[in-house]
Amino acid sequence: MAWWGKLIGGAFGFMLGGPLGALLGGVLGHGLDRGMGLLGDSEELDPGARERVQTAFFTATFSIMGHLAKTDGRVSEREIALAESVIARMELSPDMRRAAIGLFIEGKAEGFPLSDVLAQFRHECHRRRSLMRMFIEIQIQAAYADGRPGPQEERLLLYICEYLGIPEYEFRHLEQLVRLQQTFSAGTRRDHGHVPQRPAAEGPTLDQAYAVLGVAPKATEVEVKRAYRRLLSQHHPDKLVSKGLPEEMMKLAAEKTHEIRRAYEAITRARAF
């Protein structure tokens, strides 16, 4: 929570300008007029740069989540519950919780500058694909809050992916991972009563497991293991935080690694690796 403490404490040397700064500044009640600035090309960020990316990720996540929820014309109770459940799982401080809800509301407003927000988010994250993937996964979870996304929501998700440089086949893979997590994690979490829980299933089917790892059922043992290790690396919470994921979102990343492991274990049991 170091980045948030500095933000509230007034240390704005790493803060944002542009549409993300305007959104967060409006929620926090002060203006943030720093320029956008440029990040370096290194994979690891120095603390100031990392705090800036964490701020951008947090701001874009909840504002675009609100915009996505409004796409079909109304925000359902389940979509609101999903946003609240994400906040609850992150165990945000009261101040951060209020800011997240405020950003969600900002995203629902008429005239929300989606393209400008995406452009700055992409810039601030310096196109780090691991962060982009995590961002998209959270938005897919929001889209699935009240059932399978409708045509408008899906078009918007694909537009967001295109803007961030995520190809459609990768979006479909992330979608499969989110669907599996919803199917087999339901009932294992308690999100403070916000989202009705279903009895947890025992585990993924083989077809689902292969889909999660992104390999064909005829894939060799080497191909399966390679895909598994790649996905674990992409979703490793510590690695994501080092690249700018807010620490509070580590739990969301950890949930993804859990589902990836479950899929891999289902395959190894069936094939006796």
Image (cartoon, rainbow, N blue to C red):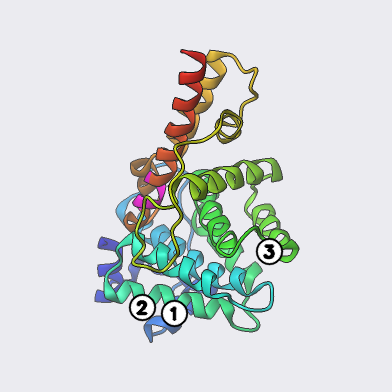
Residue 51, position as x, y percentages in the image: 35, 59
Find the distance from the CA under tag 2 to the CA under tag 3: 26 Å
Asked if residue 230 shows in the view, the reply is yes
> CB under 8 Å between callouts 3 and 1?
no
Q: Which residues are magenta?
A: 250-254
Q: Position of residue 86 (x, y in %)?
A: 42, 62
The residue located at (63%, 22%) in the rendering is: 217
109 vs 39, nearest the viewer: 109
In which quadrant of the rendered view does residue 160 lie? bottom right
Mark 1 vs mark 2, CA separation in Å: 6 Å
> How many C-alpha atoms fall within 10 Å of the one at disc 3: few (<14), some, or many (≥20)?
many
Secondary structure of the residue carrying tag 1 is helix
Residue 252 magenta:
yes
Q: Residues within 10 Å of mark 1 (few under 14, many from 20)?
A: many
Q: Could you say whether the residue bearing mark 2 is in a helix, strand or loop?
A: helix
* 67 relative position to 245: left or right: right
Name which residue lies at 39% across and 59% down. Answer: 54
Q: Is residue 269 magenta?
A: no
Q: Earlier in the sequence, mark 3 or mark 1?
A: 1
Which residue is farthest bottom?
Answer: 29
| Residue 248, image quadrant | bottom left
Residue wearing tag 2? 98
Identified by mark 2, the residue type is Arg
- Find out whether the residues at labels 1 and 2 contact each other: C-beta distance under 8 Å: yes
Q: Which mark is residue 102?
A: 1
Which residue does the image show at 53% across and 14% down from the upper left? 222
Taking depth in this image into account, of 23 and 217 the one nearest to the observer is: 217
Check disc 3 and report the residue beneath it: 153
Which quadrant is home to the N terminus?
bottom left
Q: Is residue 33 visible?
A: no
Dot 3 amino acid type? Glu
Residue 50's place in the image compared with 91, above or below, is above
